[in-house]
Image (cartoon, coloured by chain):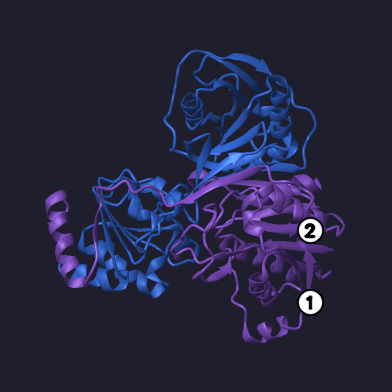
Chain colours: A blue, B purple
Amino acid sequence: MKALLIGEYREGKLLDTTYELLGFADQLGAEAVMLLVGSNDRLPAYGGTLYLADAAKCGEYNPDLHKQLILEAVGKEEPDIVVFMHSSYGWDLAPRVAANLRASQVSEVIGLSGGGFEVGCCNAKMRRTVKPATQRAVLTIQAGAFPVQQPGGAPQVQFLDPCGTGTVEFIGYEPAEAKDVDLTKAEVIVTAGRGVGKRDNVPVIQALAKALGGELGASRPVVDAGWLEHSHQVGTTGQSVSPKLYIACGVSGAIQHLAGMKKSDFIVAINKDRDAPIGEIADVLVVADVLQFVPALTAKL
Amino acid sequence: MKVLVCIKQVPDMESHFKPNGSGTWFSESDLAWRMNEYDEYAVEQAVQVKEKLASEPELTVLSIGPDRIGEALKKAMAMGCDRAVHVQDNDSAAKDPWQIASIIAAYAKAQGFDLIFTGMQSQDRGSAQVGAIVAELLEYACVTTIVGFEFTGGAVTVKRELEGGIKGVARLKPPALFTCQLGLNVPRYPTLPNIMKAKKKEIQTIAVADLLREEPLSATTSFHAPARKGGGVVLEGDVGPMVDQLLAILREKTSVLR
């Protein structure tokens, strides 16, 4: 089996997730070749074939052009699978490539199972096993699901020259909002999730954080609803944290949230849904309504 | 000018999911249904475009599924869509993203939409494929995962959400398709007068067989709960005793209680 791995490069840097692609190919026992729209000065540390296009010429985000480059490499290598990270770069490009190849796409693969691929569904509460029905498949893999593999060495570079312009003009990056709350240094974080119900209930969670001498965190829906500022957000698009104690109040546990807090030393989840995915990684799952349980806990501290 | 927004009806994600008879998706019994959360942002953005443009574009909402999805279409019309297309399909859950995208593209091809909005993914299937495939099939410009949208001078400037809170800014011209991320806007609640008005709006029904020409490219062979890793303690029962149990555990296992 041959895998074409699509590396990632942003703001002039090769992203570390590129090595997760190599870990995945290894787990599959696939021969790996790689494609990167990046720079000859920042090559991945691996000894195989690398199709390289210059990001300075192509743009770091130019889906039409990147798609053409990938299709060109597919034509040369005839891979069985084309593998992306399930990231803002990968989930944007993979369906375009798959549709052009009329290939099956399996999104956000978290494991291998009996010739198929294991993926999450229903907000990560359930799993599906998916089997491609086409000879060639396009996959996106979940960040953190497969081991990092950094074999070392220098790739044999084959330069690709992009042609054309594309329909999307990339203007630039907008930096992340300033973080006036530094959650990364907190020993205790108490996080409010959608389960707190409404903005008026956030002080209940804040009171517990204060009683424990900790910081107040927020899950994405709470920030999107405007109940708390983005600087409180824990997860892939917020802050990654690893406190001694993490208490998730009414947080269902979307993958993007778990990725930002699963390294915490001790995790308590309070949730009335016994099946919530946060229970997967919690050391203690308290099955209760946060608005009843949290004030009772705060009162005893 | 014409605008299309594509929506899906999904179960409430707090539901308890059980496999169906074939073990390839969830059983639909005992589920409460609602509009896919990402699609609410797509509908809101489409309605905002309509409200801002003097040309008053016609705004169509499309969904694929059995009779129950009429509720989601009515909600979208109560939010401001002008008309609805119901692609009648009692077996929509068994279709793969390629087939769903092909159905939408088959409908949209003859219509000449200038802008198409979809959610970035569905909450139940979560493939994040359909929007981008529709754009490929129609040969439309496309940006996924938008958290900012501005339409001025015939071009759209969007912000994409990237990892770590960074945003990418891009510009593109219609015809174009956008997949919408949470936080793009604040989806409105339909008001009672608008709910009443929506009841008079047209719902066009099209049989899926009239639009679908494609075989699936993938198959779901199993739908199941994740294996519990175990090790975690589960506390259930009355609040008082649970508080005491939790405090005892925290005193034993952590050093943070003073």
Q: Amino acid at mark 2?
A: Ala
- Please tell me whether mark 2 or mark 1 is closer to you in this view: 2
Q: Quadrant of the N terminus of chain A?
A: top right
Camera-side residue of B215 and B112: B215
**Residue bearing the label numbered 2:** B209
**Residue bearing the label numbered 1:** B202
Q: Quadrant of residue B119?
A: bottom right
Spot occupied by residue B110 in the image (x, y as percentages of width and height): 87, 57
Rendered image: mark on residue B31: none
Label 1: how many Cα within 10 Å (few below 14, some 14–19, many 20+): few
Q: Amino acid at mark 1?
A: Glu
Spot occupied by residue B89 in the image (x, y as percentages of width and height): 70, 63
Above or below — where is A54 with respect to A144? above
User: Circle 2 sits in a helix, a strand or a loop, which is it?
Assistant: helix
Disc 2 and disc 1: Cα gap in Å? Answer: 21 Å
| Chain letter, disc 2 residue | B
User: Circle 1 sits in a helix, a strand or a loop, which is it?
Assistant: loop
Spot occupied by residue B93 in the image (x, y as percentages of width and height): 62, 57
